[in-house]
């Protein structure tokens, strides 16, 4: 009904009855009073003004009483809440301010970690007087994702928030539509498909060639930018049969280079290529969507006149729509000759788009599904590659050990195979340790679709009551850094923890403490694809380069960690980059690295 109306206007229209009801009640009461006593109420205007906070207070009180009654009937306890003095502001405004400040200069997850100390790993957080469950407890995350899967869903709130970016695709939907999207994409993540490394090989070679050229000039390269291009070019070729060509554009220079201001100017020839505009629009739309998530139900009030992510996605849709239209037309022309192939399997050489068109020719559904796969195919893998390289730059002994394994199994030149990756235990351990400390999706969310409970943390306690419609935010970022779950060295980057006795001590008895790819029925379909793509690129990278160094002087000054981090101690004190997150985690202003080329003949 309101699909073409700006979000803020639609929000106000839908809530007009709620907005007008309090003053109507006051007007009715005053009119009734005047009719009985035949006199006006002094300062009646004040009652109109107070009608809103009074109605809000009544609603909050009623909701609190109802929660207690229903919880008692279910034999459950209410979620713990932080002490009043931690945030005495109405609607949790102080915590919301902390979250917004954290997104600018703070450390990811710090606000949640601070609350965890006073409430435990699962607590109730009220933002704009709306209850939100926040958890880093593995048993509760297990319930949300697996054992109580039917009680929790993405929810209408998530669908509305993500719609401008992801539409009705697999990541933002529930029920039959989610099952449909998942069923039509699953066949394309079979082993035959995810072990065809020709696409990775072409784009990895081009990415490495670009970096070598930049290093020979004497400058660092933004590795995050390079792998973002590698993953989007690989993803678009996988999806459409031809790539968007971002690796053909010039790489950016460090901030002190004379051309830096030119290459980062939106009007410069460096950023006026279509691929550059595509990437910029894609990134800006995700950032705007992340801001929506932080504001909960109230986000439309920031977008009164314009759907911000939708505006930013016009360039992306301008690329996708003609390709999808051509694909549908091509499919119709060849429908008779391919009648025998209209089953769940794939034909040799067909793209993901070709496969999806077998199941629907609706251009919106096709575009939404492609967008969901593109986000997953680029951002999560680029994040993993970025933080793996960051960790290798900080731990040269781990880099040497990883190169030794690569050269021993694959050699200095040969292209790696799927069987090679199965034998490279240390490579997988390095990736897993990166995923543990720097998971690409640090926060995620579900919503309860009915009154339900979560199991108690301590044996003998009552279960926790979860009202219907509660947003449930879970953080694998916080969970995977907890010392009580991973041991006293949980904040140390140590791939051997996935190879030695610590696996059996911590992970084997409690596998839900490690969830970089989610779990349950909605576990990531592309998990093995991501491992293969990341492993392939790293092998090629370390066949060509023998050392990796973080170039802190190449990082723009405002992207460097603030001095206060060192004083606060912990893992923040040793971070050399500033972590950021929209839908996925990334490094602020890029990861600037220098690399030394490997000798053609080298002793291992």
Image (cartoon, grey):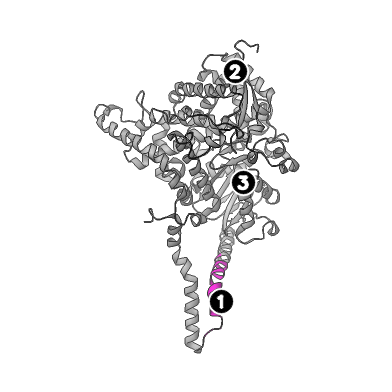
Q: Is residue 447 visible?
A: yes
In the image, residue 97 lies at what x, y percent?
Answer: 62, 53
Q: Secondary structure at mark 2?
A: helix
- Residue to which mark 2 is pinned: 406
Residue at 29 percent of width and 31 percent of height = 330
* Residue 51 part of the magenta segment: yes
Front-most of 204 and 30? Answer: 204
Q: Quadrant of the C terminus?
A: top right
Using a 10 Å C-alpha cutoff, classify the residue at mark 2 as few (fewer than 14 neighbours), some (14 to 19) or many (20 or more): many
Nearer to me, 524 or 406: 406
Q: Residue at x 44, y 29 (%)?
A: 245
The residue lying toward the viewer, choosing from 426 and 46, is 46
Q: Which residue is mark 1?
A: 46
The residue under label 3 is 104
Q: Provide residue 352's location: percent of width, then percent of height.
A: 39, 31
Magenta-drawn stretch, dominant element (helix, strand or loop): helix
Q: Is residue 168 above or below residue 384?
A: below
Residues drawn in magenta? 40-59
Distance from disc 1 to disc 3, alpha carbons, whole Å, reads: 40 Å
Q: Earlier in the sequence, mark 2 or mark 1?
A: 1
Residue 259 is situated, as x and y percent measured from the top left of the image, at 55, 33
| Mark toward the viewer: 3 or 2 | 3
Left or right of residue 273, residue 345 in this image: left
Instruction: Tell me which label, 3 or 2, sits earlier in the chain.
Output: 3
Residue 498 screen position, x and y as percent: 64, 28
């Amino acid at each position: 009904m309101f699909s073409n109306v700006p979000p803020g206007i639609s929000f106000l229209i839908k809530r007009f009855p709620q907005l007008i009801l309090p003053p109507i009640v006051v007007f009715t009461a005053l009119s009734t009073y005047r009719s009985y006593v035949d006199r006006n109420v002094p300062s009646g205007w004040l009652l109109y003004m107070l009608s809103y906070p009074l109605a809000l207070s009544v609603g909050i009180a009623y909701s609190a009483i109802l929660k207690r009654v229903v919880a008692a009937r279910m034999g459950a306890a209410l979620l713990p809440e932080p002490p009043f003095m931690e945030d005495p502001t109405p609607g949790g405004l102080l915590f919301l301010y902390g979250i917004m400040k954290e997104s600018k200069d703070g450390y990811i997850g710090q606000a949640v970690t601070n609350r965890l100390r006073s409430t435990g790993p699962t607590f109730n957080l009220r933002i704009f007087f709306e209850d939100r469950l926040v958890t880093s407890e593995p048993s509760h995350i297990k319930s949300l994702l697996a054992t109580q899967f039917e009680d929790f869903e993405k929810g209408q709130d998530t669908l509305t928030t993500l719609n401008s970016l992801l539409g009705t695709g697999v990541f933002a939907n529930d029920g039959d539509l989610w099952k449909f999207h998942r069923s039509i994409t699953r066949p394309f993540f079979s082993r035959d498909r995810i072990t065809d490394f020709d696409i990775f090989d072409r784009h990895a070679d081009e990415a490495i060639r670009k970096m070598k050229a930049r290093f020979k000039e004497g400058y660092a390269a933004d590795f995050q930018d390079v792998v973002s291009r590698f993953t989007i070019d690989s993803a678009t070729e996988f999806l459409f049969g031809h790539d968007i060509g971002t690796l053909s554009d010039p790489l950016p220079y460090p901030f002190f280079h004379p051309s830096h201001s030119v290459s980062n100017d939106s009007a410069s020839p460096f950023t006026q290529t279509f691929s550059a505009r595509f990437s910029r629009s894609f990134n800006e739309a995700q950032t705007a969507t992340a801001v929506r998530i932080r504001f909960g139900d109230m986000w439309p009030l920031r977008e009164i006149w314009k759907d911000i992510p939708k505006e930013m996605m016009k360039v992306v849709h301008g690329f996708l729509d003609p390709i999808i239209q051509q694909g549908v037309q091509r499919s119709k022309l060849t429908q008779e000759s391919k009648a025998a192939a209209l089953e769940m399997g794939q034909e040799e050489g067909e793209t993901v788009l070709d496969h999806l068109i077998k199941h629907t020719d609706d251009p919106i559904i096709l575009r939404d599904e492609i967008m969901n796969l593109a986000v997953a195919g680029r951002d999560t893998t680029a994040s993993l590659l970025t933080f793996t390289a960051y960790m290798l730059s900080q731990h040269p002994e781990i880099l040497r050990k990883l190169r030794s394994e690569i050269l021993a199994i694959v050699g200095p030149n040969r292209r790696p195979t799927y069987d090679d990756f199965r034998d490279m235990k240390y490579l997988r351990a390095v990736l897993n340790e990166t995923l543990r400390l720097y998971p690409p999706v640090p926060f995620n969310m579900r919503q309860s679709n009915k009154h339900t409970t979560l199991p108690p943390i301590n044996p003998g306690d009552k279960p926790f009551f979860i009202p219907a419609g509660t947003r449930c935010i879970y953080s694998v970022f916080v969970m995977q850094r907890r010392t009580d779950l991973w041991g006293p060295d949980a904040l140390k980057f140590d791939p051997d923890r996935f190879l030695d006795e610590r696996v059996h001590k911590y992970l084997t008895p409690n596998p839900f403490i490690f969830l970089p790819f989610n779990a349950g029925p909605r576990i990531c379909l592309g998990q093995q694809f991501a491992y293969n793509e990341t492993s392939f690129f790293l092998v090629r990278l370390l066949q060509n380069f023998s050392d990796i160094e973080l170039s802190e002087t190449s990082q723009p000054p405002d992207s460097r960690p603030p001095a206060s981090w060192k004083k606060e101690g912990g893992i923040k004190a040793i971070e050399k980059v500033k972590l950021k997150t929209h839908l996925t985690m990334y490094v602020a202003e890029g990861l600037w690295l220098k690399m030394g080329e490997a000798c053609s003949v080298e002793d291992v």
